Amino acid sequence: MQYLLGITSSKTVENKKFISDVTKVLSKKTTNITKGRSYSSILSYTAVDKYDAIWVDWQILVNNYSDFHKRLLRINKQIPVIIFSEDNQISGELCTNSELLFAVIPKSEIPNRIPEIIKRIQKYHSLLKDASESSRSYLKPIGFNNFIGNADLTLLVYQQLIKVSRTDFTTLILGGSGSGKELAAQTIHKFSIRHKQNLVSLNCAAIPATLQESELFGYEKGAFTGADRTKVGKFELANNGTLFLDEVGDMPLDLQAKLLRVLEDNTFSKVGGIKEQKVDVRFIAATNRGLSNMVSKGDFRADLFYRLNVIPIELPQLSDRGDDIVLLILNLIGKMISKSSIKVKSISWALIDRFKEMKLHGNIRELENVLTRILFHTTGSVINENILKKINLTDNQAISSEPQGNDSKQILPLREVEKDMIEKALEIYPHNLSKIASILEISRSSLYRKLKKYELQE
């Protein structure tokens, strides 16, 4: 692979060591490294040669990022950009003009993170190469279609979505609340041969069970009290297109049997009608419930489950998506500030680390909820972890509470306990930071910062 490395011309001992470390690690992966020392030289190199990724120190871009990003987009709309950020904060400029962002990494972590990022870059380019013509232009370094992220599990989802969109197979999308199931269905339809026809959705959890049948199949005039006209159902509206059944686990058993028939022979009758209608529909279903467990309990038909579970695609939890949370935070804040007068100068890495440690069961939806509250309560243009004290967090997100009883002398400052635990972990697992981070239940980036904070050696 061929890389372009953007580094500052600073001759300080610290910068020389950083450049040496980065070059050394990159050189183990490729001999094709071009160095640029200004944002204009990076653009010039990119215009005349083909690079697989650009690695660049934020100091080069700090006063010219918007112009750099716009000009780079005109040269190559799909080149991954990995930015070396300051260790304490990320510039708010990265919340906008982020289409080419592949990763934003604190400078102190870069040498250790390069091998893992390179593997993801390779997977990204492989996916780009194999993508269909219609989907390729929507595959960007920051994400695919309206998905944001490029973690290993996320890239796997993109691969599955692109592949299944080329088929007409029934697809079952699995994932927790707020993980993007509806977006996945929209993506499959968008790149399918049915994209010019309707994508019709029915959320089974949002409609009373007694109304789901008439919503799906429609009804004839006079079918029941109040049916003063004929109603067209979702199946009829989706003919030749795609029908998306969201939260299909909430569909009542009697309706499941009727749905199964349509899946088997593509025919149905309106409620109160006797005439059978034939439809040509591609089925996509989604659920946040364990359908196999529901089958074993008798709450979901086994035959319907097998009909729906032809191509299962599981969307990962946000907590399993690594660096995606950084790109999601930047992207979500960018969308919010574009619709308001709020200005964001910088976001602290400490706040991002806190998000990585939170148990966001609502996934991206919950992340957006908390970020909205943070922006609402922020009085300046700098967003840091202190803002969390002003907003209402759930029990999973909260950190501390007032001490109970009168034995406060037995309670040590948290920083002392934290340092002690990290030291003990280093003694037991020397040089194994991944294991230590896992045991301490914190992210690797958070561990790096704590090592630096307490002046501990790896």
Image (cartoon, grey):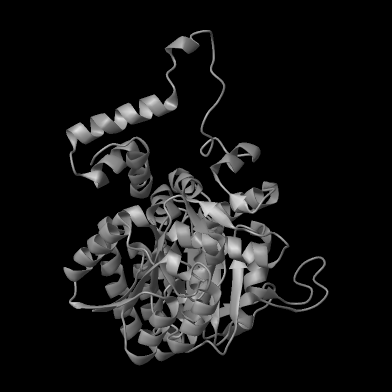
For the N terminus, the quadrant is bottom left
For the C terminus, the quadrant is top left
Task: Answer with the quarter of the image where residue 217 lies.
Answer: bottom right
Q: Position of residue 429 (x, y in %)?
A: 19, 38
Q: Which residue is found at the position 22% from the left and 68% from the top? A: 26
Q: Which residue is found at the position 66% from the left and 70% from the top? A: 215
Judge by depth and name the residue closer to the eye, 151 or 90.
Answer: 90
Q: Position of residue 349 (x, y in %)?
A: 47, 50
Q: Position of residue 117 (x, y in %)?
A: 30, 65
Q: Position of residue 161 (x, y in %)?
A: 41, 75
Judge by depth and name the residue closer to the eye, 198 or 274.
Answer: 198
**Observer able to see residue 261:** no
Circle count: 0
Judge by depth and name the residue closer to the eye, 322 or 115.
Answer: 115
Task: Answer with the quarter of the image where residue 67 lies.
Answer: bottom right
- Furthest residue in direction top, as rendered: 406
Judge by depth and name the residue closer to the eye, 168 or 321.
Answer: 321
Q: Which residue is found at the position 30% from the left and 68% from the top? A: 120
- Furthest residue in direction front, as rendered: 11
- Left or right, 337 with respect to 164, comes to right
**Observer able to see residue 192:** yes
**Residue 284 versus residue 373 in the image, above or below:** below
